[in-house]
Amino acid sequence: MCPSCHSLEYKWSKVSGRGVVYSFVVVRNPVHPAIRAREQVPYNISLIELEEQEGLRVCSNVLNIAPEDIYVDMPVQVTFMPTVDEPNVVLPLFVPSD
């Protein structure tokens, strides 16, 4: 639902893939066995605000950066990664940009 007009009609729109980190958290304690087994901590869960519209946000991860180097308003760019189980399904992830 649109928070402004309460419309239930949606349409796909192209976006640049550029944005900034709006908020983030660093996960240091793996709670799921699949993550624990692969020793994939720490990792971040980041809320990215896209540049096209204030309030247009995507929950994702920022790759190629140490957890202590992530900061609010950090510029990022989308990249896509195929999933392990379904190579035809890709996830939008983000990397730091200049």
Image (cartoon, rainbow, N blue to C red):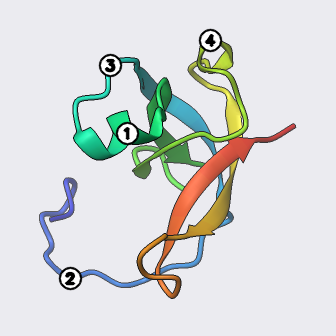
Report whether residue 52 is seen. Answer: no
Query: Mark 4 vs mark 2: which is more N-terminal?
Result: 2
Q: Position of residue 5 (x, y in %)?
A: 18, 63
Q: Is residue 26 left or right of residue 15?
A: left
- Callout 1 amino acid: Ala
Give the number of the mark in front: 2 or 3.
Answer: 3
Q: Position of residue 33 (x, y in %)?
A: 25, 40
Residue occupying image coordinates x 67% and y 27%: 74
Name, please, the residue furthest toward the front. 37
Q: Tell me if residue 38 comes above or below residue 39 in the rendering.
A: below
Q: Are marks 1 and 2 in contact (CB under 8 Å)?
A: no
Residue occupying image coordinates x 43% and y 83%: 12
- Callout 4 amino acid: Glu
Residue occupying image coordinates x 49% and y 30%: 43
Q: Tell me if residue 30 comes above or below residue 32 in the rendering.
A: above
Res. 30 image quadrant: top left
Question: Which residue is disc 2 drawn over?
Answer: 9
Report whether residue 91 is seen. Answer: yes
Q: In the drawing, what numbered circle is on residue 29?
A: 3
Q: In the drawing, what numbered circle is on residue 68?
A: 4
- Callout 2 amino acid: Glu
- Callout 3 amino acid: Asn
- Circle 4 packing at 10 Å, graded few (<14), some (14-19), many (20+), is few
Give the Cα distance between marks 1 and 3: 12 Å
Q: Are marks 1 and 3 in contact (CB under 8 Å)?
A: no
Secondary-structure class at tag 3: loop
Query: Mark 1 vs mark 3: which is more N-terminal?
Result: 3
Give the Cα distance between marks 3 and 4: 16 Å
